[in-house]
Amino acid sequence: MKIHPKRLGLEPLCAFVPLPLRPLPLCLPFSHWRKPAAVLSPSPMTDKQLSLLLGGFIPAVLFGIVAVFQKVVNRTGIGVGPYLMGIGLSIFVMGALFALWERDFAVPARAAIFMALFGFLWSISMACVAVALKRYNGQIGQIVSIYNMNTMVTVVIGLVVLSEWKNVHPAKLLLSATLITVGGILAANA
């Protein structure tokens, strides 16, 4: 049985949804619910610029803010388990919102395996940071500087395993990763 948004009383809510969010399924006629998301209009930025902005600069700022929250939360006396569960719940909610936005719920088996590995490794990493902050009175500026040396690990894996050396200038990339590593070492000794 197909239920139309009008029957659910949802249509009036769409008037309050900001324009950028209008593609949400509840604000479209039922016939459009399963159509692919609209293609964005052309941007004056190149794909490379957009990828660096969306995948690099914005996350860098947000991860910087998150690091401060890591310290504040872990100083409240929360256990590592509830800390990770709270973060997981937030991630689940954001994932659900993005799935609704994109109207894409596909999870191929291979993706599920790598998602699980990512989640396990990430949660172990965040648990280690939480323990360092909570039990050993770690300084977030030093800890973040050290764990951001993951850049070197990522660059090497990207160049070698993912063959990204074909699409980038490897020497410049390795040099920048080395400078980040040196900066992390200096910050750790501050």
Image (cartoon, grey):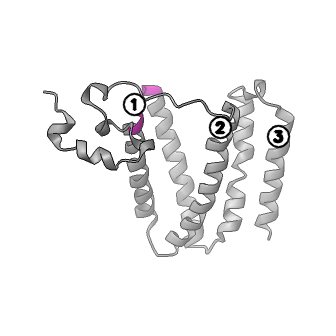
- Residue drawn at x 42%, y 48% is 94
The x, y position of residue 148, in whole percent, is 69, 54
**Horizontal placement of 174 versus 106: left or right?**
right
Task: Tell whether position 105 is magenta.
Answer: yes
Q: Earlier in the sequence, mark 2 or mark 3?
A: 2
Q: Quadrant of residue 176?
A: top right
Predominant secondary structure in magenta?
loop
Quadrant of the snapshot with the N terminus: top left
Q: State how far apart marks 2 and 3 are (Cα).
A: 22 Å
Residue marked by disc 2? 50
Specify few, some or many for label 3: CA neighbours under 10 Å numbering under 14, 14-19, or 20 or more.
some
The x, y position of residue 29, in whole percent, is 27, 31
Q: State how far apart marks 1 and 3 are (Cα).
A: 36 Å
**Horizontal placement of 120 versus 132: left or right?**
left
User: Disc 2 vs disc 3: which is toward the camera?
Assistant: 2
**Horizontal placement of 105 versus 44: left or right?**
left
- Residue drawn at x 69%, y 48% is 150
Q: Which mark is residue 104?
A: 1
The x, y position of residue 82, in whole percent, is 40, 63
Foreground residue, 11 or 58?
11
- Residue drawn at x 30%, y 44% is 14
Name the amino acid type tagged 3.
Answer: Leu
Specify few, some or many for label 2: CA neighbours under 10 Å numbering under 14, 14-19, or 20 or more.
some
Name the amino acid type tagged 2.
Answer: Leu
Task: Using the image, determine if residue 172 lies above or below residue 142.
Answer: above
Q: Which mark is residue 174?
A: 3
Q: Secondary structure at mark 3?
A: helix
Q: Secondary structure at mark 1?
A: loop
Name the amino acid type tagged 1.
Answer: Asp
Magenta residues?
Answer: 101-110
